[in-house]
Image: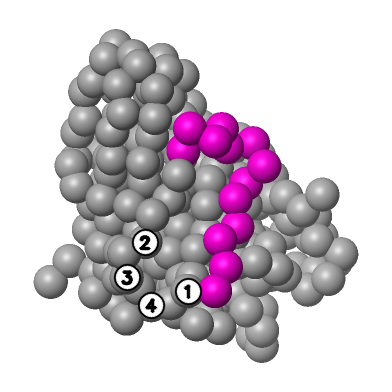
């Protein structure tokens, strides 16, 4: 069955440190992949997406992700964490009906 | 200029009641969705709907029913509410042929 897996339900980084949030997919065909962010008590906001073309995708707020077919991964990174990055992050993949399968989420804490 | 809006933001009700959550999008999108987010932040698709097709996730009880008066609205009706229905419900929309989904702010439902 189609699914995405997020390793690490909680990640803590110091302010200014590298952020790395992991996502692996299971599709056997080239997938579309998304990262969404959810700030406390808010809805989901699109960070970035991979559809076709360039495997390194840049998103909002300095985030980027690289699609690696050989590793079936789509990890999210940011060179320098900011306090405002503290949130829940979700990796997602749509099925053929465009219904999203979400990962279980990663809660990012940024330590001052 | 909210793109996807939901009402109410909070809904507290007793077991056995029937309630509705409204969703409206002003993006001109063709497809709308309902997702449920449980207390562990896990997001799961409930329905997707456009003017041609309703796709219901097989795990959704038939107490839940989407109703679409027009393309811009997809309301969620819940009959005979149960304690396990307590969650945050998100509405989303996407354009025809597009995969990116735009989410509403969520409705927190509490069943007592």
The residue closer to the viewer here, B54 or B100, is B54
**Eye-nearest disc, 4 or 2:** 2
**Residue pictured at 32% horizontal, 70% vertical:** B70
SS at badge 2: strand
Q: Mark 1 near mark 2, Cβ–Cβ under 8 Å?
A: yes
Chain to which mark 4 belongs: B
**Residue pictured at 45% horizontal, 44% vertical:** B65
Horizontal and vertical percent position of residue A106: 51, 40
Mark 2 to mark 3 CA distance (whole Å): 5 Å
Residue A78 shows up from this direction: no
- Dividing the picture into quarters, in which one does residue B112 lie? top left
Disc 4 designates what residue?
A: B29
Horizontal and vertical percent position of residue A102: 58, 49
Mark 4 to mark 2 CA distance (whole Å): 13 Å
Disc 1 designates what residue?
A: B51
SS at badge 3: strand
Mark closest to the chain's N terminus, 4 or 2: 4
Q: Mark 2 near mark 3, Cβ–Cβ under 8 Å?
A: yes
**Eye-nearest disc, 3 or 4:** 3
Residue A52 shows up from this direction: yes
Callouts 1 and 3 on one subunit: yes
- Dividing the picture into quarters, in which one does residue A27 lie? bottom right
């Amino acid at each position: 069955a189609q699914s995405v897996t997020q390793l690490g339900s909680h990640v803590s980084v110091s302010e200014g440190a590298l952020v790395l949030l992991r996502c692996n997919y299971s599709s056997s065909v080239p997938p579309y992949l998304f990262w969404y962010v959810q700030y406390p008590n808010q809805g989901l906001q699109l960070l970035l997406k991979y559809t076709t073309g360039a495997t390194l995708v840049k998103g909002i707020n300095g985030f980027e992700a690289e699609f690696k077919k050989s590793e079936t991964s789509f990890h999210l990174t940011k060179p320098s964490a900011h306090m405002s990055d503290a949130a829940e992050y979700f990796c997602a993949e749509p099925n053929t009906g465009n219904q999203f399968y979400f990962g279980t989420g990663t809660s990012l804490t940024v330590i001052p | 200029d909210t793109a996807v809006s939901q009402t109410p933001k909070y809904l507290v009700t007793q077991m056995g009641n029937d309630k509705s959550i409204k969703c409206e999008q002003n993006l001109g999108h063709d497809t709308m969705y309902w997702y449920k987010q449980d207390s562990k932040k896990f997001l799961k698709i409930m329905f997707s709907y456009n003017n041609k097709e309703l796709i219901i996730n097989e795990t959704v009880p038939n107490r839940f029913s989407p109703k679409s008066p027009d393309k811009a609205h997809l309301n969620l009706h819940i009959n005979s509410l149960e304690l396990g229905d307590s969650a945050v419900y998100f509405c989303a929309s996407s354009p025809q042929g597009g995969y990116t989904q735009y989410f509403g702010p969520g409705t927190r439902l509490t069943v007592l």
